[in-house]
Amino acid sequence: MFWWLYYADSSSFKDLPLVMWLQGGPGGSSCGFGNFEEIGPLDTDLEPRKTSWVSSASVLFVDNPVGTGYSYTDSEEALTKDVAMVAADMMVLLREFFNKQTEFQSIPFYIFSESYGGKMAAAISLALTKAVQKGSIKCNFAGVALGDSWISPLGLLSQMCSHWGGVCVCVCVLQSLLDDYGLMEVTRAAKAVQEAVEQGQYEKATEQWSITENVVEQNTNGVNFYNILTQQDDELMKSSLNDNGYLCKTEQRTLYRSLSQLMNGPIRKKLGVIPKNVTWGGQAEEVFESMSGDFMKPVVDIIDELLAAGVNVTVYNGQLDLIVDTIGQELWVKKLNWDGLKKFSQMKWTALEDPESAGQTGAFYKTYKNFAFYWILKAGHMIPSDQGQMALRMLKMVTLQE
């Protein structure tokens, strides 16, 4: 498993937290996408990023699970099948990391994630909590943040396709793009997903999910699931790495060709440690296929366990994200068994000023005890790419720097 560490840009990195970033997919590379397209110190043109998270934290990128990005395996049996295997592999890496980088053992350690990375982050956080309690991993685990996360797939699907009377912009825009016939087709496809999940046929449910998204695309002239105010790039779609899993292939088709050239060219040469037989992103399709039986399974119960254990849990979501819409996130939150849910639900949103537009609202949030929810405006699935300054402010708030 390949990891990449940046020490915080500070006179003393020990005064700032350590953040691990996990990409989605499964099969999306943190060391590629998260690093060069979202929060790392350089962009894909190798120019400095003004909103890099390295300004406020040391950042650890991990290509996870094995087979993703620069992480590789020579055995198909080593590819993970579910989030339990993902978490077990990550415990090996984190144990070795903190044993080697002893300077980080006492520094507050947070896990931030995106998309399916949030589902993996939940399982990893629970395993890490237990490992810290047992003393097998020495670290100061301070919390997990789940960004546009794949926590309750069926709930997200039902909100994406339903007639919703609320104010979720992404759902309203989607339905404004669908006529009655289109909505009927999408609803029919979504019901097939639901039936497969109810029957416990999770691989079939994953296949039906991909079909549903194709139906949506066909009836909306290619609405962008990651940001509803933009359309998919047909050429980038044709060059996508993975033809099976939508989350994986969409994340990898965003500037995929230039990023692939960057990672398999100058970055690979600069690192000097990547085996000759390993291609960046070369096993991503196998990763998704191996995890297909886990893809549509919810992990809401894991969130309950984390909250009950006193772990700080943050949920953050982009307003313009369709594939993981905010109302769908709120839906599974309302189903938590957490003892603080009633009071949390009664709280009103608190507005946050947009750091780039004085006097304008950039986000809403509310927090109670060890749970927080951020709704980032004018952002899609990849919040740091769409609203870099707001994402950076959220990072500081979650890590208690603001």
Image: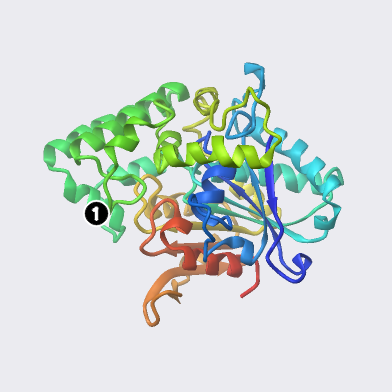
Q: Position of residue 145 (x, y in %)?
A: 58, 55
For the image shown, how many numbered marks are present on the structure? 1
**Residue farthest to the bottom, as pictured:** 359
- Residue 192's place in the image compared with 313, above or below, is above
| Residue that numbered label 1 is attached to | 172
Q: What colour-coding does the image apply?
A: rainbow
Where 197 falls versus 120 (above or below)?
Answer: above
What amino acid is labelled 1 in the image? Cys
Density class for disc 1 (Cα within 10 Å; few <14, some 14-19, many ≥20) is: some
Q: Residue at image x 38%, y 77%?
A: 357
Secondary structure state at the residue bearing disc 1 = helix
x, y percent for residue 1: 69, 34
Nearer to the camera, 184 or 67: 67
Residue at 48% across / 58% down in the picture? 384
Question: Where is residue 323, by image quadrant?
Answer: top left
The residue shown at (30%, 45%) is 224
